[in-house]
């Protein structure tokens, strides 16, 4: 039988998660003066609140003992002054805490996004876009409440409890001991309830992230949803996920409701017992006056309310710990060592010479499947090289390795004789451009999409790039020209137009190494002619690597590398490969041109 070890649980879970949560407070440091003033105001307003029951007790005693009207008025005005002071300090405390919170969360959002975008490809392979988006939106929103109100309430209630107990002991030690009997039970129950609430809260956050993922994916792929008439399928999928989150939230609500009910019963039961006990003490002469009992009861109410509020705050902190853990999981992922590509040092300029030296590779998520095995080849500067072969041969993997989205498992890739691992990552990628088969365009206008190749370019440079890409003609026909909105993923443009925008983007970048990943495979004849003409202009005077299924597009290549099952099986010019009897390239070529 296994026993629950409370000490081990507190050490292994509570302290660990609390330390994680406190890590986020480093983002508050730049605003520490404001935060400190806010804490001072919080302390003063809490003390002002503690003075209130004492003054009320004195007011009751003054009227009961027949004091002068001016004494009663003085106490009344003093109470008004305390209330006004408490209100003013509370106002400024809230304003300061909100200001600090908004600035802190802005930095936290930026930090998480900046870290997220610097993470390597292997991180994104196993995660979905909607889930990551939810981490930045809903998880940080949960922390907003914690930073703005929860921590301040926690501190305020601690001050009220400690100060209130001290004043209760001063008023009546016997009654105080009697009242405090309930505290150990309340705190123990708060601890165990908070543990369960935190577990459910983390589940809710995960389920909400999964639901957001469905929204993100269906909106991005709305064309496929419509084309396959899967609207009701997606609605049902989203309904199930949101109902899961709601069910978990309701289970959490049962615990919170039971906890609150117990606290109300315990606190008000204790107050009844305190009044009964106090009445007995007055009757026996052990308590001096009704005013003291009145103050004691109000202090007891304050403390009882603070204990109840403290339990609520504790559960809120537990919920925020779940969100914190999710965010810190992202921040703890090792990022790529990237730098600003605009600051390219002269010693990192490349001529375009590339060599693969016995490169072997498997993807991190599929270590048992070898994608490349002992691949070796060289590409001279300004040479045009084609990679051909059946699907799954490893062509796109070579592109990923060239861009250092992944590093080889064995062997090395060199650029101008320098090991790629030793070249700054951003400096390497800054001198490359990729024109893929499935072009991704941002949802803004054409100007922004072309300018993405080299941010900060002038309009003249963007127009010149569009001309070279055979795109300026159709751009001019749009009423808004370069300001034409392309829609989500470029949905407003045809396939050929999107491809030419991508080529214009690459032209503007002016790379030393150009990678064309089946850039014409999905186009009609007229679009292919325009795109092919633009690509030929783009390839001039730079190292070009072309992946192609249509072998007619690579006949003019200086070298053709034929891959099959992750290995190089043939290498040479089109003419040389066509003379190889029974060669793979010859068979592929004859199959295409005879059909």
Image (cartoon, grey):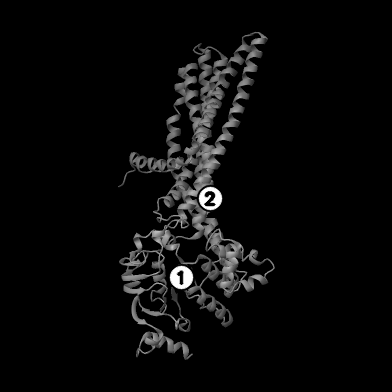
* Residue 195, horizontal then vertical, whole percent: 43, 43
- The residue at the point 49 percent across, 57 percent down is 131
Nearer to us in this view, 177 or 282: 177
Number of the label disc, if any, that sits on residue 290: none
Which residue is farthest front? Answer: 346
Answer few, some or many: residues within 10 Å of disc 2's Cα (few below 14, many 20 plus, some between 14 and 19).
Answer: some
Cα distance between the residues tagged 1 and 2: 40 Å
- The residue at the point 58 percent across, 68 percent down is 464
Answer few, some or many: residues within 10 Å of disc 1's Cα (few below 14, many 20 plus, some between 14 and 19).
Answer: many
How many callouts does the rendering have? 2
Q: Is residue 251 visible?
A: no
Q: Is residue 117 visible?
A: yes
Q: Quadrant of residue 386?
A: bottom left
Nearer to us in this view, 312 or 405: 405
Label 2: which secondary element: helix
Nearer to us in this view, 235 or 433: 433
Residue pointed to by mark 2: 138
* Residue 294, horizontal then vertical, whole percent: 57, 19
Residue pointed to by mark 1: 514
* Residue 414, horizontal then vertical, whole percent: 34, 67
Quick one: label 1 or label 2, which is nearer the N terminus? 2
């Amino acid at each position: 039988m296994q026993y629950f070890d409370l000490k081990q649980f507190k050490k292994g879970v509570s302290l660990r998660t609390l330390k994680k949560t406190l890590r986020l407070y480093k983002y508050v440091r730049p605003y520490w003066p404001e935060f400190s003033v806010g804490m001072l105001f919080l302390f003063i307003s809490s003390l002002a609140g503690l003075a209130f029951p004492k003054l009320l007790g004195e007011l009751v005693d003054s009227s009961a003992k027949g004091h002068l009207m001016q004494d009663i008025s003085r106490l009344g005005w003093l109470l008004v002054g305390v209330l006004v002071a408490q209100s003013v300090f509370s106002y400024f405390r809230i304003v300061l805490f909100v200001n600090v919170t908004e600035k802190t969360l802005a930095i936290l959002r930026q930090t998480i996004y900046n870290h997220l975008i610097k993470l390597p490809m292997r991180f994104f392979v196993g995660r979905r876009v909607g889930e990551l988006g939810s981490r930045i939106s809903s998880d940080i929103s949960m922390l907003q409440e914690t930073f703005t109100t929860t921590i301040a309430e926690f501190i305020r209630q601690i001050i009220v409890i400690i100060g209130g107990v001290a004043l209760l002991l001063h008023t009546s030690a016997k009654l105080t001991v009697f009242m405090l009997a309930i505290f150990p039970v309340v705190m123990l129950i708060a601890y165990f309830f908070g543990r369960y609430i935190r577990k459910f809260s983390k589940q809710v956050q995960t389920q909400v992230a999964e639901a957001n993922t469905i929204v993100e994916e269906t909106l991005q792929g709305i064309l496929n949803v419509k084309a396959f008439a899967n609207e009701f399928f997606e609605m049902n999928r989203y309904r199930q996920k949101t109902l899961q989150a709601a069910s978990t939230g309701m289970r959490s609500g049962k615990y919170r409701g039971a906890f609150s009910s117990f606290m109300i019963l315990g606190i008000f039961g204790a107050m009844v017992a305190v009044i009964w006990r106090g009445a007995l003490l007055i009757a026996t002469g052990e308590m001096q006056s009704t005013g003291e009992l009145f103050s004691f009861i109000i202090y007891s109410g304050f403390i009882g309310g603070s204990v109840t509020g403290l339990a609520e705050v504790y559960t809120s902190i537990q919920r925020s710990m779940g969100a914190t853990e999710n965010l810190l999981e992202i921040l703890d992922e090792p990022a790529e060592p990237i730098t600003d590509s605009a600051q390219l040092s002269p010693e990192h300029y490349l001529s375009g010479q590339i060599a693969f030296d016995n490169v072997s590779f498997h993807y991190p998520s599929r270590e048992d499947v070898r994608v490349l095995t002992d691949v070796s080849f060289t590409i001279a500067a300004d040479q045009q090289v084609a990679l051909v072969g059946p699907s799954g041969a490893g062509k796109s993997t070579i592109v990923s390795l060239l861009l250092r989205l992944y590093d080889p498992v064995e062997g090395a890739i060199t650029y101008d004789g320098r090991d790629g691992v030793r070249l700054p990552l951003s400096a390497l990628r800054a001198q490359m451009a990729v024109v893929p088969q499935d072009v991704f365009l941002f949802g803004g206008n054409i100007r922004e999409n072309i300018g993405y190749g080299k941010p900060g370019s002038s309009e003249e440079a963007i127009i010149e790039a569009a001309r070279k890409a055979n795109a300026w003609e159709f751009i001019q026909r749009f009423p808004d020209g370069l300001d034409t909105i392309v829609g989500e993923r470029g949905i407003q443009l045809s396939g050929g137009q999107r491809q030419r925008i991508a080529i214009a983007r690459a032209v503007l970048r002016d790379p030393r190494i150009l990678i064309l990943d089946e850039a014409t495979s999905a186009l009609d004849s007229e679009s292919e002619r325009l795109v092919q003409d633009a690509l030929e202009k783009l390839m001039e005077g730079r190292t070009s690597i072309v992946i192609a299924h249509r072998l007619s597009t690579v006949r003019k290549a200086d070298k053709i590398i034929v891959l099959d099952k992750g290995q190089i099986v043939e290498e040479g010019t089109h003419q040389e490969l066509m003379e190889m009897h029974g060669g793979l390239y010859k068979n592929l070529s004859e199959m295409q041109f005879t059909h």
